[in-house]
Image (cartoon, coloured by chain):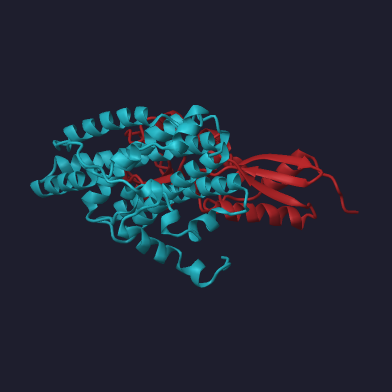
Chain colours: A red, B cyan
Amino acid sequence: MVRTAYTKEEIMHILSVIPDPEIPAVSIYEMGMLRDVVISDKGYEIVITPTYSGCPAMSIIAQDIKMTLEAGGITPVTVKLVYDPAWTTDWMSAGAKEKLRKYGIAPPLHSSCAQDVFADNIIECPRCQSDDTVLLSRFGSTACKSLYKCNNCKEPFEYFKCH
Amino acid sequence: MTEEQAIYNYCLRMGDNSLIQSYRLSEWCSNAPILEEDLALTNFALDMIGRAQAMLAYAGKIEGKGRTDDDLAYRRSERQYYNHLIMELPNGDFAKTIARLLFTATYEFYLFTDLQRSADPTIAAIAAKTVKEVKYHMAHAGDWVLRLGDGTEESHNRIQKAINKLWMYTGELFETDETDAILADKNIAVDLALVKAKWTAHITGVLKEATLSVPEDEYMQTGGRKGVHTEHLGHILSEMQYLQRAYPEAIW
């Protein structure tokens, strides 16, 4: 029998497995990009927010959401992009930050460090936990990251900027 | 002019400014002096594309004729673009690109800081997002102006020359017309006189610290906000809009 009604929690649970297309180690839910599910007689509206306004992953995320729900017979689905409140790295769960670290990306410090965008924060190496690291480039492969090098284990790594 | 028309104009201008500036910064991709700079400038360009999409999508929604952000970007001609002239000028050397970025990012930082309190919730939300990003653009440009100005004789001369050349395009950033007046009245738009005061103070501070001189306000270029552009915008659009013009309705 096909179920015709789902609760918000059930939908959230189904969507919580969708990975961030650029950092597949964490899900869009853990990243804080999945904001809300609005259920009405028009169907299911999924509310998402971008990390940075030019985030190129948004259309892929919207597509993944539709495909995931439609595969479970959950229709019709619309995806709404909102900017308010503006995404912050503070919405990342502690678990998500730990997953980032294991994936080789130094997790963001608290967003208060974004007040002075070029402050010299001490960023711990995600591989050997050394504090002896040096900034290579303030901008990296995606808008949300910068590049560092560890002087202890000599490995380069990415740091997820606090935002 | 109705309030809706004014919001449409206002968002179109902000969208056009982001889009055209983004186009220019994208031209640095694989051409910047160092790899780190390549990443920085194209990261900024990406932020601006996102902002342009948000602004143009909202303008299209307000207009109510079913035009999307892509329609507005790819199906308008030169005279229907309302970006400031400074955005469309060729990149020139690295110093000129950095000087422009200092002028525009500082303007955007103060503009969007105030727009976070706009009575229009969509504009306020886009502004809050933008402020977080444009902070980086402003700090990055300021950093380079210091290094170039207080660097070698060659770098000092180049950045000073760029600042002097671009100065006459900064007056337009603070021009106001009926659109601004209608929206300022409703607390949707910001008071550009206040933005100008903060802009001038910041720019003067950075230039002085960089041992550079602040140009005198003399003749200021104008026209972009009325759709009258330099010869450079047409060239940008002919490349940017080529695909949609050659194959209308083509989708990705």
Q: Position of residue B5 (x, y in %)?
A: 54, 42
Q: Name above or below for residue B192 compared with residue A70.
A: above
The outermost residue toward the bottom is B246
Q: Name above or below for residue B151 compared with residue A74.
A: above
Q: Quadrant of residue A35?
A: top right
Direction from residue B40 to residue A65 in the image, left or right: right
Q: Does the image show residue A27?
A: no
Say how many tags the image has: 0
Q: Position of residue B245 (x, y in %)?
A: 49, 68
Which residue is located at x 48 percent, y 47 percent? B12
Direction from residue B227 to residue A4 in the image, left or right: right
Which residue is located at x 65 percent, y 42 percent? A47
Q: Between A78 and B13, which is closer to the camera in this rendering?
A: B13
Direction from residue A70 to residue B236 in the image, left or right: left
The outermost residue toward the right is A1
| Quarter of the image that includes the C terminus of chain B | bottom right
Q: Position of residue A132 (x, y in %)?
A: 32, 38
Q: Position of residue B25 (x, y in %)?
A: 34, 54
Q: Name above or below for residue B94 compared with residue B108.
A: below
Q: Name above or below for residue B216 compared with residue A77.
A: above
Q: Does the image show residue B218?
A: yes
The outermost residue toward the front is B1
Q: Between B137 and B178, which is closer to the camera in this rendering?
A: B178
Which residue is located at x 17 percent, y 36 percent? B216
